[in-house]
Image: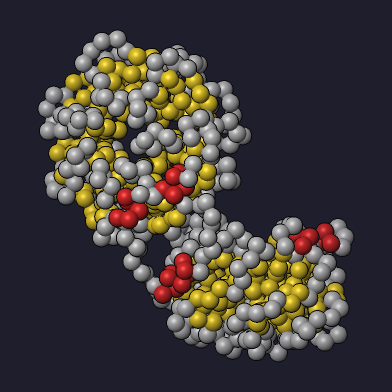
Amino acid sequence: MRSKSCRRRAPVMTVIPLMLLLLGGGVVVAVPKAPATAQSDQQVAGSSRSLGDRPRLRQITDLPGNESTPVFSPDGTRVAFSADGSGSRDIFTHDLLSGTTMPLVATAAEEYEPRWSPDGTSIAFTMATDGAETVAVVSSTGGEPIQLVPPELPARRARWSPDGRSIVFGARAESGRQAWLVSPDGSGLRALTTAGDHLPYGWSPDGQFVLVISFGREQNLWGVPVDGGPRLQITSRDGEEWWPQWSPQGDRVVFYTTWGEAMTDIWTADVATGALTQVTDLEVEDFLPAWSPDGRWLAFNSDRASKSGLWISRPDGADATPVATDGRVGSLPAWSPDGAALAFSQLATKDELYSLSAAGGETVQLTRGTHTVVEIASSPDGGSLAFESVGVGTEADLFVMNLRTNDIVRLTDETTYNARPSWSSDGTRLAFERSSGGGPRTNNVATMPVGGGEIVSLTSSGYVRRPVWCGQFIVYTVEHSATSDGPNQLWRVPAIGGEPVQITTTPGDKWPTDCSLDGTRLLYSVMLDGNRSQWLARLTLDAKLNDAVTLGVGEGGRWSRDEQRIAFISSRDGTTDIYTASAEGLVLERITNDATVESPPDWGLAPDQILFTANLGGRDIWIANVGDLVARR
């Protein structure tokens, strides 16, 4: 009988996972199945529907804090990345064969921007102490880093030459930013450019040129010869070009630019002729392109799916295909050496399920998988939890978790929208909001058995929201668009079917949040003059609300098992936290601090256990399997 009262909120803390996208071929076979973390994770992943042409995604890091800048080892068996979970950025490696993640460099300084040597024996990176940056090298198996650049030359952005004999990096000197060369042992330090303002971004495939952005009256791309000779101008158009990369064949350079437009687009330039090809031309941001090892594809970041995601396309823009669009992708994507996988970092966007004791104690994460847990509803006996997830498939679906075993069962698997579950008082059925996909006009109340089975629709008017099972009835909100320009009002319909009846007419938008087991005491939220507050009222059989009393600023109220306390969320102190109050609205207690809870809480199996959803993740590394995808085209 528990129902939800609000949609998603701002995330709590951000942890960014590292993901690897498998494209097919060698690495796909080499990468082992992710080790099991919890039974719930296995079942959640196992119940996912196929996404057709979407590649398979697998998260490979889950460290505290943020992981970023992943790069494959030359043999494709390891990924190096930086992570800031210790309070400063350090270099880690993840072994794709064993699934183990190990710190490579963890000093008092900050270490980031790792780059593998061509033979895989060393990693160059940027090291910063008190803000002063330098370039260093360390063995890929760990050990003491070797600083390559003297302290008086601030340096970063190290890139190995194709033969591994030199490293180019950018350094700021009195003459401006310049490109420098050094050997991996620290010898042979010399300036490659000496005048102007230049940032190095890599090498030509034959190692004869270093690709730089030259800043001046115009910002253009140049190839600077390593052994002397005339520079090669690659672009000459007014504007700014960023993150250039030489193609594997050496004939083109890819980059992104605005070139006077409001949005960034991806272009390529012919090295020999300077001829330009526009790869993307949409009213969205497309940026951070990266060539596949065979030069047949480009991976890039794009916000064409409303948030920064990972896409691939042909170098001419054809066959643009989404790879990962469920989160905020960050950093340049990295291809595996065989072109079978993409590694990228992604900001966590999944709202997971957590529990804590109302008396205090540790917060425990209950789900960790493909679900974005949006709204939860605890069964009358507290042993099961129904929830809505928008992380599996294209629409929201309903699931039930056994809180004793963490087993998860999927109840709906359709193209329709099934959301905001609420239990009957005997725990045998669920009421929920159901839509055929035509927006709010198609939202109606439906019920189904908890074990799955026939779905019964109880309303047909549309514009129906947030059903709550209340004794013999189901109470819900009808949005004003369905009736008039007035506020959203509460209605009820018999649970066995029948004529709906309006039960409120007072000012303010209203949403039911929970009901006592006997169906006589209804909790609901009211929005009036921009302020949302939680109310308690007695519901009579003649569809009247009596003895209404406000419990204060908040929403999403849920009864405890003994119906003596109410848990709800409130943003009274700037963050969305969980509070409890007595049934009379007295004895207010704050349960979480600065948690920014994502949706209304509910009570769990133990008398003091409170369940809630939140996004406590950060930026992690993921892998995406796109091999089958590119092989078909």
User: In the visual, does 424 lie left or right of 400?
Assistant: right
Residue furthest to the top: 230
Residue 409, percent across and down? 53, 76
In this rendering, the count of numbered labels is 0
Indicate the quadrant containing the N terminus: top left, top right, bottom left or bottom right.
bottom right
Colour mode of the rendering: secondary structure
Kindly identify the residue that appears in the image at 13 percent across and 31 percent down. 186
Figure check: 489 above or below 109: below
The structure residue drawn at horizontal position 47% and vertical position 17%, both measured from the top left corner, is 275
Task: Say if residue 209 shows up in the picture.
Answer: yes
| Quarter of the figure with residue 130 | top left
Q: Nearer the viewer, residue 268 or 139?
A: 268
Q: Position of residue 73 (x, y in %)?
A: 26, 45
Residue at (44, 49) in percent of width and height = 628
Vertical relation: 286 (above or below) 579: above
Measured from the top left, where is residue 592 in percent x and y?
49, 69
Left or right for 177, reference 486? left
Residue occupying image coordinates x 60% and y 82%: 451
> Residue 577, percent across and down?
54, 66
Residue 527 visible in the snapshot:
no
In the shown orientation, is residue 217 left or right of residue 436?
A: left
Q: Please say if 327 is above or below 375.
A: above
